Amino acid sequence: MLRGSVSAIVVLNFLMADEEPVDPKAYLEELCKPKCVKPLIEYRGCEKRIEGDETGHKHCTGQYFDYWSCVDKCVAKKLFEKLK
């Protein structure tokens, strides 16, 4: 499924040759986000837990980076296999 989507990006970039190039990373991120549901749930749960913290000492940085690390790993597999 994703392989055809990446090919569609290449075709779209070819058709838009006269315009600014389109970065496929944002598109691939959207395709990869559903594969990273567990880290996203953990991040949102953390946000709810610290919602009322007025001290500013509590944070969800670890969960945030875990989520985006998952997305980035998924994107990297698809993005870099298409580069020449």
Image (spheres, rainbow, N blue to C red):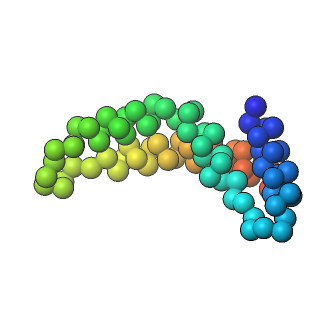
Judge whether 35 appears above or below 65 on screen.
Answer: above
- Where is residue 38 shown, x and y percent of the image? 45, 31
Whether residue 8 is visible: yes
In the image, is 81 to the left or to the right of 52?
right
Image location (x, y in percent) of residue 52: 16, 44
Outermost residue toward the left?
A: 55
In percent of the image, x 72 and y 45: which residue is there?
78
Quadrant in which residue 50 is drawn: top left
Q: In this view, does 79 lie above or below 43?
A: below
Q: How many marks?
A: 0
Screen quadrant of the N terminus: top right
Q: Residue at x 70, y 53 (%)?
A: 24
Residue 29 position within the rendered picture, expressed as x and y whole percent measured from the top left:
60, 46
Residue 79, position as x, y percentages in the image: 72, 50
Vertically, is 27 above or below 2? below
> Quick check: 38 left or right of 23?
left
| Residue 73 visible to the viewer | no
In the image, taking residue 2 as reference, residue 57 lies left or right, namely left
Q: In which quarter of the image is the C terminus?
A: bottom right
Toward which corner of the image does residue 21 lie, by quadrant? bottom right
Residue pictured at 55% horizontal, 39% vertical = 33
Residue that appears at 38% across and 43% down: 63
